Amino acid sequence: MTILEAGRALRQKKISVLEMVSESLRRIERENPRLNAFLTITREEALARAAELDRELARGIDRGPLHGIPVAHKDAFHTKGVRTTAGTKILRDFIPEGDADLVAQMHQAGAVMVGKTNLHELCHGITSQNPHFGGVRNPRDLSRIPGGSSGGSGAAVAAGLVPLATGTDTGGSIRIPAAYCGVAGLKPTFGKPSCRGVTPLAFTLDHVGPMAATVRDVAAAFGAAPPEHPEIRGLRIGVPGNFFFTGLAPEVASALRRAVQIAAALGAMAGEVRLPDPEELNTAGRLIQLSEAASIWRRYRERREDFGADVFALLQQGLLIPATDYVDAQRARRVLARDFARVWAQCDCLLTPATAITAPRIGESVVSIHGREEDVRLASTRLTRPFNVLGWPALVMPCGVSPEGLPVGLQLAAPPGGEETLFRVGAALEDALGPR
Amino acid sequence: MTDWAEIAAALSLDLREQDRATVIAALEKLERDFAPLRRRIPFDEPPWTGPEQ
């Protein structure tokens, strides 16, 4: 059941909050042994909160679209009195004294936390194969990764364990699991909502946002009005002629071509645009992320055995980068942001693939695309990271499946503050693409 | 090119043999990729502080 469907059922008194939350908990208990999407289940607190929210509704207090909706928070979000590990052994017993801003906002809006989701260690990777808490499996194919770092959140939504989850996104960590698991995920404009109370990875690249089954659900969770009859006639959708459509797996390329044709059939002006080289954004972004992450985690550098090998190698790289290189990367970022912003003279939003490939197999570190080998991490992040560096909002949604039945993700990006445009285009495409 | 092994030694960073090649290769690539971009930064360009709306 989606957030909007649940809300209707709740208000028509066809279901209670307690029934909805109990069903979510039942599913988690049944499916988590095979998915490992949850690190903590907050059963008792959730049931108590659900009963309280039912009493509120009976008294005529309606908190809005998230009233009574079960939510799973990525285990990087501080949750008052509930363990928050950030996927690291170092924080395995950390109990925060307060909630992260987004957790508090969702609680106020009536969402019911049912648990905390598994993730890539420190949010510093895309496989969600956590060496301390075990790997998350993709519900679409258990032999594959769910993507990451918000892999538990993506898997939990895709498997129907919860209608809503939160994620963090520093280089694609909401959008990659959304693409690989076949759900929708939003990386909002930088700074909105605030990252306060979220275990940081890279302060100037970190974003937080919702993941849900549909674009309209993501809009509702973001606090926007879900578009009822989205109209995109005349909207200028830019399809980058360079970079984003190069080196794609054939099933990704064909699903995206179809999505572009559908957008045009809906009356949008879908045309090619030229961008400056996004690979430069990726270079600056990697340099910044490595440096900032190393600055945050350097205090634990003597505890090598407490880190996974992949994460420790990234922290070591960051420790070696000179301060002048970091500052130069931030200066270059400003130059690039100015250059890239010119694209908004040509279009209202961009349409790109989310990832170059569909979900890789667990343990696969290299993939072959048209006979060319590419590191799985790069094939997963090269199309998402540019929007972290620019701070632009970007939405990922499913747009098809591969012959193997794996979801293909489409990415929409807009100018800062342009989330409403993303929801409008996303909802229109969702309707036209058919049932999920 | 920067001698990353020498910097690691100067910082007393415990760069073990099994990690050395991976870490250094990644930094060499980053340095190579970043060089042309760095050359384009205007002298008085300040750092990025957030997207302009």
Image: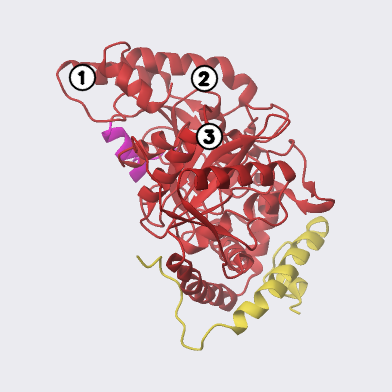
Measured Cα–Cα span from mark 2 to mark 1: 25 Å
Label drawn at residue A433: 3
**Magenta part of the protein: which range?**
A94-109
Label drawn at residue A57: 1
Q: Residue at x 25, y 21 (%)?
A: A53
**Amino acid under disc 2:** Ile
Q: Sequence-wise, which precedes: disc 3 or disc 2?
A: 2
Query: Mark 3 and mark 2, same subunit?
Result: yes
Question: Residue reaching furthest left?
Answer: A59
User: Where residue A435 appears, x then y in whole percent?
Assistant: 52, 26
* Badge 1: residue crowd in 10 Å (few <14, some 14–19, many ≥20): some
Instruction: Read off the chain for label 3.
Output: A
Label drawn at residue A28: 2
Label 3 element class: helix
Q: Is residue A68 left or right of residue A399?
A: left
Is the residue A343 above or below the residue A46 in the image?
Answer: below
Label 2 element class: helix
Q: Sequence-wise, which precedes: disc 2 or disc 1?
A: 2
